[in-house]
Image: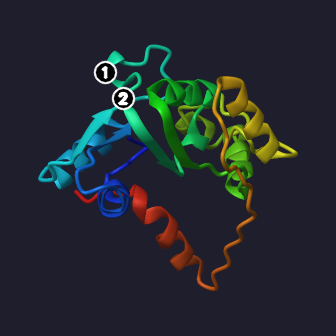
Amino acid sequence: MDIGCGPGDITNDIILPALHPNAVIIGTDISEDMIKYARKTYSKEKQLDFDVLDIQTKELPAKYISEFDHIFSFHALHWCFDIKQAFKNIYRMLRPNGTMLVLVVSLHPICKVIQETIQDNRFAPYIKDVNISPVWPFQDSVNPNRELKGLLKEIGFKIDHCSHRNVYHFDDNSDQFLCKYFDLFILPT
């Protein structure tokens, strides 16, 4: 399963080719529009299906419990309001000895911008999720790696590897920077 698959391109173009040729993968996302697009664009793939799923749900569909050998999530789980529930659901979806590979952003300067925008009366009426604080689960953490490991162990995961890496990006052209990082969220009409 790919959690937070968005439009399905990473699921189809990167994850699926890296798996066994007979592997079947399901891409899930909270956005119905993203899933509709993914189904329309990649429905020809026999090994690939898409479904709407809020990974934070308290009522995980029975069809997902103990059904997956591998679960992936890249740049999605840090958007969860209840990351603990998200990881509990992932744990329940994995078969015994199943693996999880996730990439979670622990902090980013954009969070401060979002928090300040929420507080600004000019923009607050246009922001639906005004209770975001902090924006990402580990945004204010002193040691996000240790905090994430503790959370995962508490849930029951056996951790083979968990690391925290500082990544910096500099681009001389700010227009290019925005195109590189925001074109993934724009769906063609």
Q: Where does residue 98 sit, x and y in percent of width and height? A: 48, 37
Residue depicted at x 74% and y 42%? 138
Q: Is residue 87 above or below residue 40?
A: above
The secondary element bearing badge 2 is classed as loop
Q: Is residue 174 above or below residue 125?
A: below
Mark 1 crowdedness (10 Å alpha carbons): few <14, some 14-19, many ≥20: few
On the question of residue 140 being in view, the answer is no
Q: Residue furthest left?
A: 44
Q: Which residue is mark 1?
A: 63
Q: Residue furthest right?
A: 142
> Quick one: quadrant of the N terminus?
top left
| Amino acid of disc 1 | Lys
Q: Is residue 11 above or below residue 135?
A: below
Q: Where does residue 186 sit, x and y in percent of width and height? A: 37, 58
Q: Is residue 110 left or right of residue 127?
A: right
Q: Are marks 1 and 2 in contact (CB under 8 Å)?
A: yes
Q: Where does residue 131 sit, x and y in percent of width and height? A: 66, 28
Mark 2 crowdedness (10 Å alpha carbons): few <14, some 14-19, many ≥20: some
| Amino acid of disc 2 | Glu
Residue depicted at x 39% and y 34%? 68
Residue depicted at x 32% and y 52%? 7
Residue depicted at x 53% and y 48%? 101
On the question of residue 116 being in view, the answer is yes
Q: Which residue is mark 2?
A: 67
Label number found at residue 49: none
> Quick one: quadrant of the C terminus?
bottom left
